[in-house]
Amino acid sequence: MSETETRDKLVAAAERLFAERGADNVSLREINRAAGQKNVAALHYHFGSRRALLVAIFERRMAGINQRRLELLKAVTTSGRDSDVRAIVEAMILPLAEQLSDPARGSHYVRFLAQAVSDPNVDVGDLIRGRFDHGVAATRRLLRAILTDLPPPVTEQRLDLASKQMVYALADRERHMAKDDRASADLWLFIDNLIDSVAAMLTAPVSRETQQRLSEQQKLSA
């Protein structure tokens, strides 16, 4: 087996185990064993650290996802739809959702991402910043430019909520699909409805209650 094949097997095994149990609950020895490596030092030789292994998993998946997202955003802007919230949300969600629709891509990445996002010991932003986050950053810039009727703190909270809703909803669907083939039957209905839901959440009017909370917070911080 070549070094490249060994490295790929280690990354795939780590992605699966981290997806199932979280990065802190899997030993390097377990990853070596799951990848079929008899040499207990194989993972350390190829990656050197757990952080480098996490970066390798993101690189394996997010390089393509980031490029796909940028292509969709380019199509949105060149067609004059850069003020269409749903079109931008679709460009944000679709590249990640497509991971579920292609068995050749595996069925663990979105669950791995959900585990990483929720892990206080994993700084996903630090791992991907400047490498694979250009598409996400571009969607956020476009959405900020549209959502000018919202107070900036509300806009930022909603953008964060949109990212988490996307990841956790898709991870849950990926989990169901891994257990039951029937969960794939309405996948694209689920994806379209998720896009609708996120777009609706971003554009929802700010309630009187939220406005009042915001005013109180601003007074306290003044």
Image (cartoon, rainbow, N blue to C red):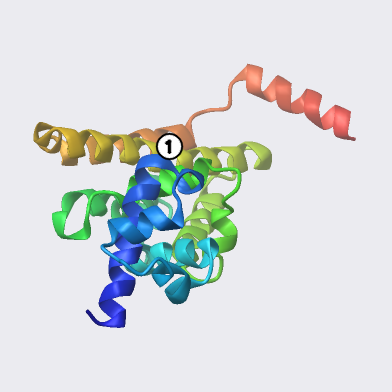
Say which residue appears at 26% left-offset and 63% top-offset.
36
- The picture quadrant where one finds residue 172 is top left
Q: Nearer the viewer, residue 112 or 6?
A: 6
Please report the residue visible at 46 percent of the width from the left and 65 percent of the height from the top: 53
Please determine whether, in this image, residue 67 is positioned above or below residue 199: below
> How many numbered discs sit on the rendered protein?
1
The percent coordinates of residue 85 (x first, y second) are 41, 46
Q: Residues within 10 Å of mark 1 (few under 14, many from 20)?
A: some
Q: Secondary structure at mark 1?
A: helix
Q: Quadrant of the C terminus?
A: top right
Residue 91 visible in the snapshot: no
The residue beneath circle 1 is: 165
What residue appears at the point 31 percent right and 51 percent down from the top-left corner?
Answer: 16
Q: Which residue sits furthest bottom?
A: 2
131 sits to left or right of 65 = right
Position of the N terminus by quadrant: bottom left
Residue extending furthest toward the right: 222
Residue 179, visible in the rendered structure: yes
Name the residue at 22% across, 55% down.
106
**Height in image: 206 above or below 133?**
above
Q: Nearer the viewer, residue 165 or 43?
A: 43
User: Residue 102: horizontal and vertical position, in percent?
Assistant: 16, 55
73 left or right, relative to 203:
left
Three-letter code, disc 1: Gln
125 horizontally vs 110: left or right: right
Q: Is 8 situated left or right of 23 in this image? A: left
| Nearer to me, 12 or 59 | 12
Q: Position of residue 129 (x, y in %)?
A: 56, 65
